[in-house]
């Protein structure tokens, strides 16, 4: 599945598609699968599918790990990889990169 913009990304997450983290500022999350749990217009709470006891799934009172979408300019979409940055699109500003299954 190739995502080309933030609107498509939001629709894919809302549809329940699972994504795999390819890069993350917290190295232990790399390779982890996630799925949207609570979907908002400005953010999502993500859980680890089929792992109800995972600390990510249990975060925020069982809603999951919170991720704000931010502005479209914070995102980069390239060859199916969705990358979110906090500021300028440089490695040190990476929040996370992921692909959909």
Image (cartoon, rainbow, N blue to C red):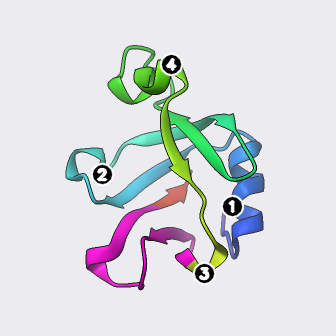
Residue at 67% x, 69% y is 3
Residue 100 visible in image = yes
Query: As drawn, is 78 to the left or to the right of 26?
Result: right
Closest to the observer: 99 or 8? 8
- Residue found at the very far top of the displayed protein: 53
* Residue 8 in the image: above or below residue 44: below
Label for residue 9?
A: 1
Lower position in the chain sequence, tag 3 or tag 1: 1
Lower position in the chain sequence, tag 4 or tag 3: 4
Secondary structure of the residue carrying tag 1 is helix
Query: As drawn, is 58 to the left or to the right of 28?
Result: right
Secondary structure of the residue carrying tag 2 is loop
Mark pair 1, 4: CA separation: 23 Å
Residue bearing the label numbered 3: 73
Residue bearing the label numbered 4: 62
Residue bearing the label numbered 2: 30
Q: Residues within 10 Å of mark 4 (few under 14, many from 20)?
A: some
> In which quadrant will I find the N terminus?
bottom right
Residue 77 visible in image = no
Residue at 41% x, 53% y is 21
* Residue 9 in the image: above or below residue 57: below
Q: Position of residue 69 (x, y in %)?
A: 60, 59
Q: What residue span does the magenta drawing correspond to?
A: 74-97
Label for residue 31?
A: none
* Residue 39 in the image: above or below residue 25: above
Lower position in the chain sequence, tag 3 or tag 2: 2
Lower position in the chain sequence, tag 2 or tag 1: 1
Would you say residue 51 sits in the magenta stretch? no
Residue at 33% x, 74% y is 93
Mark pair 3, 1: CA separation: 13 Å
Lower position in the chain sequence, tag 1 or tag 4: 1
């Amino acid at each position: 599945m190739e995502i080309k913009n933030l609107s498509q990304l939001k629709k894919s997450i809302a549809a329940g598609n699972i994504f795999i983290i390819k890069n993350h500022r917290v190295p232990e999350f790399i390779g982890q699968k996630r799925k949207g749990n609570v979907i908002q217009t400005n953010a999502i709470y993500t859980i680890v599918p089929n792992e109800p006891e995972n600390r990510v799934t249990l975060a925020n009172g069982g809603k999951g790990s919170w991720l704000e979408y931010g502005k479209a300019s914070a995102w980069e979409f390239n060859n199916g990889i969705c990358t979110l940055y906090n500021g300028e699109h440089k490695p040190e500003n990476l929040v996370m990169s992921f692909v959909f299954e």
